[in-house]
Image (cartoon, rainbow, N blue to C red):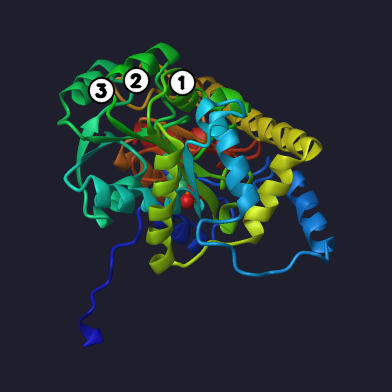
Amino acid sequence: RWSEVTMAPADPILGVAVAYNADPSPKKVNLGIGAYRDSEGKPLVLQCVREAEKRIANDEALNKEYLPVQGFDRFLKITPQIIFGKDSPAVVEGRVAVCQSLSGTGALRIAAEFIAMYNPGTMVYISNPSWGNHHTIFKKAGLKYLNKTMGLDFDGMVADLSAAPRGSTFVLHTVAHNPTGVDPSQDQWKKLADVCQEAIFDTAYQGYASGDLERDAWAVRYFANTRGLELMVTQSYSKNFGLYGERIGALNVAVKSKDTAAKISSQLKGIVRPMYSNPQLHGARLVTWVMEDPALKALWEKELKEMSDRITEMRSSLVAALVEINCPPPNANFRNWNHITSQIGMFAFTGLSEKHCSLLTGKHHIYCTKNGRFSMAGVNPSNVKYIAAAMKDAINS
Ligand code: PMP
């Protein structure tokens, strides 16, 4: 019977990493997966994390017992403060239901289950393009979704959201939209708050875009604190803590009353218990130890700023390298390469076509997703000129 199982297609993003690992070329460059690399192309473990790890290892009073279904209590207390702000009325008044999750993906998955339970007919609006997994996550929970063009097309986005059926759900990227790196301005967010219905703010890059945790949380804080809107916020600590493999994140549901928040918390537990029973402990301790300790938190913010500065610098270096060799823009819609420096966050949406990307990979051993998205973390002073030359060759081929 099992022999009838067919091969599932490779994940479009994770498949890039598999192909990269299998390539023996010494010239190879990985611009696929969104994980930070230092200026030598190596993965980075933050010093604040190393320090927290030492403190945890040396504390013999700590044990490895199960966490409660909803997660580590100290983490559940501090994580909404990081995204909504310490003085957020929703946080201070205990109106946020919080559930620790298997990072951002897990938080979205719990959110999708919850929405499917309480708002089953909802139409889920996802920007086009978006992080590929958004579509599958919401489909898995049995939700319909429409894939609409948003991003730069702000008028189109407002028109779509305004025309959405009542009870629709909008998946919004809090900061550093993946894959485009193009966010609404603060004025545009204000207009979106007028037309928004149920919103889920997916927060995978807080502090990563500007190097400033507060600034990168602006949209969520405006909706929740300034406008008092009810909303869901997913948090991922993968990128901003470099804790990809620890799977630390949270789902926050900010509502109008403490009583409603308590009821929602109980239902979120009901979703988690039969799925994976309870979340993991070590990563929750790591981020909590850092976020609670003012000195470690300051170190975290310094390291975050260094990571985001390096990426910003690589954006400028890549554009400079392209200009230096007179590389033509990717297609007729672009007059130059300035979009690479105006975009923010981990990714550059280069405008390269699928054909360009296959040439980059096939001929030059440069790996990226076929929609032309580059993980800027994979760019460093040693490979930037090589990448630029390969882009020129692909465009001119
Ligand atoms: N949302 C977006 C927009 C992302 O880019 C990512 C990571 N690529 C995630 C959520 C989830 O990542 P993780 O599960 O590692 O937190």
How far apart, in angstroms, are the residues tagged by discs 3 and 1?
19 Å
**Relative vertical location of residue 123 with respect to residue 195 in this rendering, above or below:** below
**Residue at figure coordinates x 53%, y 30% from the top left:** 84
The label nearer to you, 3 versus 1, is 1
Mark toward the start of the polypeptide (2 vs 1): 2
- Is 169 positioned to the left or the right of 259 in the image? left
Instruction: Sort mark 1 into few (<14), some (14-19) or many (20+) by Cα contacts within 10 Å.
Output: some
Residue at numbered disc 2: 193
Q: Quadrant of residue 395?
A: top left
Badge 2: residue crowd in 10 Å (few <14, some 14–19, many ≥20)? some
Q: Amino acid at mark 2?
A: Ala
Q: Amino acid at mark 1?
A: Tyr
Mark 3 vs 1, N-terminal side: 3
* Element type at mark 2: helix
The image's mark for residue 115 is none
**Do we see residue 44 in this rendering?**
no
Q: Which residue is mark 1?
A: 222
Above or below, comparing residue 105 to residue 277 in the picture: above
Task: Give the x, y percent position of residue 301.
Answer: 70, 33
Q: Secondary structure at mark 3?
A: helix
Residue 197 at x, y = what percent? 27, 29
Above or below, comparing residue 120 to residue 188 in the picture: below
Outermost top residue: 187
Residues at discs 2 and 3 in contact (Cβ within 8 Å): no
Of 133 and 112, which appears nearest the observer? 112
Which residue has dot 3 on it? Answer: 157
Q: Kindly indicate whether the residue at mark 1 contacts the one at mark 2 (C-beta within 8 angstroms).
A: yes
Q: Is residue 157 left or right of residue 99?
A: left
- The first of marks 2 and 3 along the sequence is 3
Calculate the distance from the C-alpha at mark 2 to the C-alpha at mark 1: 9 Å
Q: Nearer the viewer, residue 34 or 280?
A: 280
